[in-house]
Image (cartoon, grey):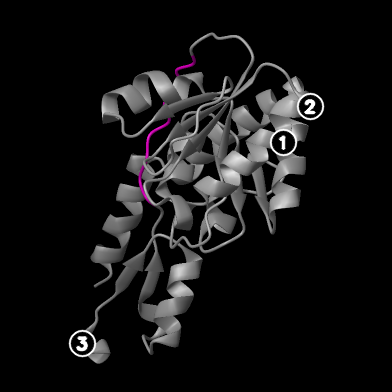
Amino acid sequence: EFRRVLFRSTWSEWSAEGFRKDGIDKNKIKVIPLPYEVKPLKLKHDGINVLFIGRDIKRKGGDVALAIMKRIAQVRKGVRLIYIGKGISEKHEWLTHYPSVSISLLHNQIFPLADIFLFPTREEAYGIAALEALAHGVPVISSSVGALREIVENGIDGYTVKNEDEMQDKLLRLIDDDELRIRMSENALNRVSMFHDPQRVSKMVKEIYDKI
């Protein structure tokens, strides 16, 4: 079956390596970024909003996000966690919980209110939520798994970390440093514009088909 493949496209080098291990000719594997437009809308608000999104609380690390925020709430005032996902019943002054939200609400109100995207996922093939955050100019702190090491440029538009303690340290750094958050926000918008621009991606796809 693999011999009949003209080419196999994928969004990441991490995924491409999986195809190579499965026996697909490396010359037939094309890494094409996921097309995505930047959405730089920002809404004014007080304090710092940390955003978490995850329908699967265990796999996406919702328990880790809550644990980190419980500790941070004891040492930093004005920091709020916006938690989108089911499976929790906790109530805290610093917690805003949405079991689910509409696409419109997410992109027109919640992402524009977010200052930091926290993504302590335990397993992730790609991580579209991280790309969505970056497209809104929201720095991402994520686990160093799957393709997230490609989506998030460590130290440039966020951080990829190896454990919970490191994630908390990076979160505190971004909470405390306004200039760093602003710089990473600008870097995020620039990187998404550069690598995920729909016109650029469309051109890449056309060039591949023209060679077949």
Q: Which residues are magenta?
A: 34-42
Q: Mark 2 packing: few (<14 Cα in 10 Å), some, or many (20+)?
A: few
Percent of width and height locating residue 38: 43, 31
Name the dominant secondary structure of the magenta segment. Answer: loop
Identity of the residue drawn at 24% across and 73% down: 212
Sequence-wise, which precedes: disc 2 or disc 3? 3
Residue 180, visible in the rendered structure: no
Say if mark 1 contacts mark 3, CB within 8 Å: no
Q: Secondary structure beneath disc 2? A: helix
Identity of the residue drawn at 36% across and 85% down: 24
Between 194 and 71, the one lying in front of the other is 71
In the rendered image, which quarter contains the N terminus?
bottom left
Residue 148, visible in the rendered structure: yes
Between 162 and 19, the one lying in front of the other is 162
Residue 75 disc label: 2
Q: Up-down: is 182 above or below 99?
A: above
Q: Secondary structure beneath disc 1? A: helix
In three-dimensional space, the C-alpha distance between marks 1 and 3, rounded to whole angstroms, equals 54 Å
Say if mark 2 contacts mark 1, CB within 8 Å: yes
Q: Residue type at mark 3: give it.
A: Arg
Is residue 199 toward the left or the right of residue 78 in the image?
Answer: left
Residue 4 disc label: 3
Percent of width and height locating residue 99: 34, 34
Please tell me in which quadrant of the rendered image residue 47 appears: top right
Q: Secondary structure beneath disc 3? A: helix
Q: Mark 3 packing: few (<14 Cα in 10 Å), some, or many (20+)?
A: few
Residue 71 disc label: 1
